[in-house]
Image (spheres, rainbow, N blue to C red):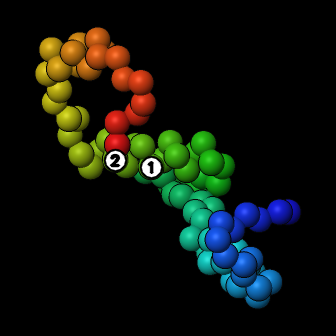
Amino acid sequence: MKLLFVGEKAPPSFQLLEMRKRRVSFMITSAIGKDGVTHTTNRGILHNFVEFLQSKYDPIQVDDACVTQMEEAEFRTLPL
């Protein structure tokens, strides 16, 4: 595995291992749905998260004219 660090030296192996441990510790490996079923796949966890957000928040109201105007605008780059 080749790491690219612009303008710096590569961090020591210990720091790379610590970075990996930190990243892995924040990974979601399972989620329990409303029906009590444990989801362990990425798709299942994502579906569970979407259901949670849909039940917690109301849909955002959008004016159709604004959507049409955005579709007609020609963006050469993505707006930030």
Q: Is residue 35 visible?
A: no
Question: SS for tag 2?
Answer: helix
Q: Along the line of sight, which residue is nearer the eye, 7 or 75?
A: 7
**Image coords of residue 44 (percent x, y):** 58, 45
Q: What residue is rendered at 80% in x and 83% in y?
A: 13
Q: What residue is rendered at 60% in x and 65% in y?
A: 27
Q: What residue is rendered at 51% in x and 57% in y?
A: 32
User: What residue type is disc 1 on?
Assistant: Phe
Q: Is disc 1 surrounded by few (<14), some (14 to 19) or many (20+) residues within 10 Å?
A: some
**Image coords of residue 53 (percent x, y):** 34, 47
Say how many tags the image has: 2
Q: Is disc 2 surrounded by few (<14), some (14 to 19) or many (20+) residues within 10 Å?
A: few
Which label sits on residue 59? none
Q: Residue furthest right?
A: 1
Where residue 38 sits, quadrant-wise, is bottom right
The answer to whether residue 46 is above or below residue 66 is below
Q: Along the line of sight, which residue is nearer the eye, 71 or 34?
A: 71
Residue that numbered label 1 is attached to: 49
Residue that numbered label 2 is attached to: 53
